[in-house]
Image (cartoon, rainbow, N blue to C red):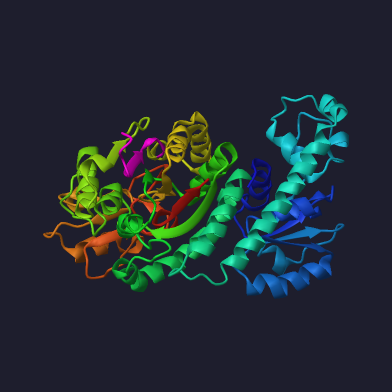
Amino acid sequence: MSKFSQAIFNKLFLPDGKKFVVARNRDGLLWLQGCRTALDGYGVQVFHGTSLALRIVRETVVKQNPDKFILFVMTGEFEILPDIARECDVVNFQFRSFFPHYPWDTVKHLTFEQKEWLYEQKGIVDLDIVLKSGDFCDIAYEKTNNQRTYENLIKNWDYICSEIDFNRPTDWMQKAGEIILSVIELGRWNDFRSRVAEVNERFLEFLKTGYINIVSSTCGTKYPRIVTQVLPFIHRQPEEKTALVVIDGMNWWQSLMLTRYLEDKLSVRSTYDCIYAWLPSVTELSRQAIFRGDIPSVNYVQNPANEEKLWKEFWLQKGVATFEQYYQHADMIKEESSVKRLGYVAVELDNMMHSSANYTYLHSNTKNWIEEEEIIANIKHLLDGGYKVFITTDHGNIDATAYKKLGQRDKLGADLSLRHITLPNAADKGLFKAEYGEHVVQVDSDSKTYYARGKEAFMNSGKCVTHGGTHWLEVLIPFIKLEK
């Protein structure tokens, strides 16, 4: 919601804190469609009319919905009867109070979108100059077009989410990722998050019964289903030379930004499949699972040297000689001409993710990372070298908000991130659930691993983009094939 919408809502509903408000609005602007749409974003139902209409709204809508925000805009002057007056807050509302720096006779004729823009300028622009320049027409058009685009995205989202097969998520995730990227680019992510949360509740229920089947499934011939199957899948490819590029911490919508750039700059075609990260969705487990080609070990120490060791051990077991395989962590790729199996890990995007406060910053950081073109140059090097290139990640990410920092008693000896904790053997599950139960969930009730619910994070304050939990934006990750 915009600052203008927030100011209107506050002026109407904060004076006495009642959810039923009757407004005297002599300028009549509260009934404008733009204003009603803005209030709808706060869950406010808006009605207008005479004393009789007010009585009907009170007897039907208000009585049946005591917890909803109800606004009644008076048309004309009339007495509010005592029984209604006791239940509502009566507000004298005038839009002119929001614009003390400008002549009201000019401002009142502007559209709601234009008023919204003017309010956020805090009196620093010359209204006469702006009107003469014609910029207000562009502002109104952009606002209206933005809203129509967003409404179409909502319709598409509701359609694709009516039925989701999390056992075969590729088709759905491709469409979902494109919608989310469009929503972020429109600046409407905060408005959209409730829909993402609804899907996440369904996804969590699936994980409780379906994740074990994903883990134990066999690797398909067309694509892997989970990170443990990535190397076995690549091993089955008939191509002489294959390269695996693992981009640490890349969300699905970020991968779309990357492949669109690749398709434009390198004239390549990308094919997407959706696979599962390992749970918990942290690097030391999920990326280990990729390079081990098997279930990860809890005693593994994550670092490039151990990752290279896993890579070489896997390919040696498959009969690939040492001089035919190569692993590199970051920087520009420099391999020998004899290499047939190449693994490359890019970590810059994960660093940017952890330094971003929300998806707006992460989108900007991702754009900068792509346009710096090191990753583009590396992929071009591989394609020009005759490699069939696969791109994936170890986990996605979620823009999280603080719930509560875990107590020292719970953290002692525990495996944890901001989004999960695996209690040490000596810990008492009952005591932990008594303190954190409403804010944690389990995929396997027999384990001692708990995940922060929804988009919460184990910290005392603030916001961040992170990973380690069960959110579908952390767990459902891209597996991309590039072809010239």
Q: Is residue 21 above or below residue 351?
A: below
Which residue is located at x 34 percent, y 68 percent?
Answer: 214
The answer to if 308 sits in the magenta stretch is: no
Left or right of residue 161: residue 128: right
Left or right of residue 148: residue 221: left
Foreground residue among 450 and 291: 291
Q: Which residues are magenta?
A: 336-349
Choose top left, top right, bottom left or bottom right for residue 325. top left
**x, y percent for residue 55:** 77, 71
**x, y percent for residue 395:** 37, 51
Foreground residue among 409 and 476: 476
**x, y percent for residue 358:** 48, 42
Which residue is located at x 76 percent, y 28 percent?
Answer: 101
The answer to if 346 sits in the magenta stretch is: yes
Q: Residue furthest left?
A: 426
Choose top left, top right, bottom left or bottom right for residue 442. bottom left
Q: How many marks?
A: 0
Left or right of residue 123: residue 285: left
**x, y percent for residue 251:** 45, 49
Determine if residue 356 is in view: no
Which residue is located at x 46 percent, y 37 percent?
Answer: 384
Left or right of residue 483: residue 244: left
